[in-house]
Amino acid sequence: MDVRVYRSAEEASSAAAAHIAALVARKHEAVLGLATGDTPLLLYRQLIALVRSGGLDLSRTTTFNLDEYVGLSGDDPRSYGHYMRTNLFDPVGIDLARTHVPDGLAPDVEAECEAYEHAIAAAGGIDLQVLGIGADGHVGFNEPTSSLGSRTRIKTLTRRTRADNARFFESPDDVPLHVLTMGIGTILDSREVLLLAFGDGKADAVARTIEGPVGAIVPASALQLHRNVRVLLDDGAASRLALRAYYDEVAANLPP
Ligand code: GLP
């Protein structure tokens, strides 16, 4: 994995935004996989700024989000569909027909998940997937012990994840128990991954992801099997990495 530690979340997010802008400049019709949560908010702010300054044109890109809560409509302010429109899609003016978020109200969940996988394939696959990470090492909503070959499907959240995400709801009990999420296999099929993590609260999950054994107990550790993953961290999230000095040395002396 390509591990980069930045002085701040802002700096890491600017680097991620520049990376995405370079990809879209090379491939206007790039397919972007997008994440929610607090972590990518600074990245989305940077992307909005780039679009407004003329440094990025997202009008021909297609997007697929990782996940959605079952039982929430995309108009519900607590849904990920709403989060994406508020924090990226509306500000950059992307045609919503080019954006995809699993439908948390789909009457036939299995058909919805299958259709989501087909839509990704029909778009040519995901060029670049943005990921955050849960404190327990989940990516998307692939909780510990998710199959490393999993595809988009319904999952049950752990108590810990529901507690972590309770800040968007009235109480942990109001956080839906079920979600639709791309699988680990879906994520591993993307051509490139940018994983962002900020703050001490993510340090343990980050260390286990990068330096621990590959195993379903830390779903993000499956990324060790992917050929093109860049991990962008701040000091807090990097604080438990045994090989931190090595990563800094690599980043400071990139091969020509
Ligand atoms: C949720 C999302 C994940 C996200 C994680 C971390 O569980 N489904 O995609 O990475 O939260 O969220 P945050 O970035 O707010 O710490």
Image (spheres, grey):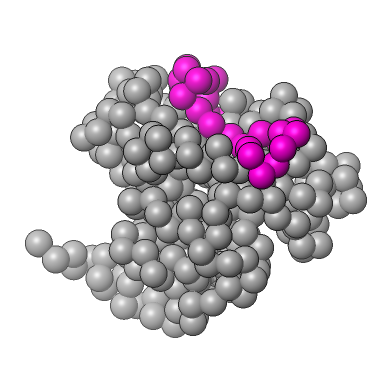
Q: How many labels were placed on the picture?
A: 0
At a point 48% along the width and 39% down the height, the residue shown is 118
From the top left corner, tell me how far across and down residue 100 is, in percent: 53, 31
At a point 62% along the width and 75% down the height, the residue shown is 217
At a point 31% along the width and 70% down the height, the residue shown is 248
Q: Quadrant of the C terminus?
A: bottom left
Whether 46 is drawn above or below 6: the answer is above
* Closer-to-camera residue (120/245): 120
Does residue 144 appear in the picture of this structure?
yes
Whether 250 is drawn above or below 116: the answer is below
The magenta region covers: 87-112
Instruction: Give residue 108's quadrant in the image.
Output: top right
Q: Is residue 194 left or right of residue 25?
A: right
* Closer-to-camera residue (12/136): 136
Instruction: Give residue 115's quadrant in the image.
Output: top right
Magenta segment includes 220: no
From the top left corner, tell me how far across and down residue 76 is, in percent: 76, 28
Magenta segment includes 98: yes
Does residue 14 appear in the picture of this structure?
no
Whether 166 is drawn above or below 106: the answer is below
From the top left corner, tell me how far across and down residue 151 is, in percent: 54, 54
At a point 81% along the width and 62% down the height, the residue shown is 159
* Closer-to-camera residue (100/113): 113
From the top left corner, tell me how far across and down residue 32 is, in percent: 41, 38
Q: Quadrant of the N terminus?
A: bottom left
Q: Is residue 167 left or right of residue 150?
A: right
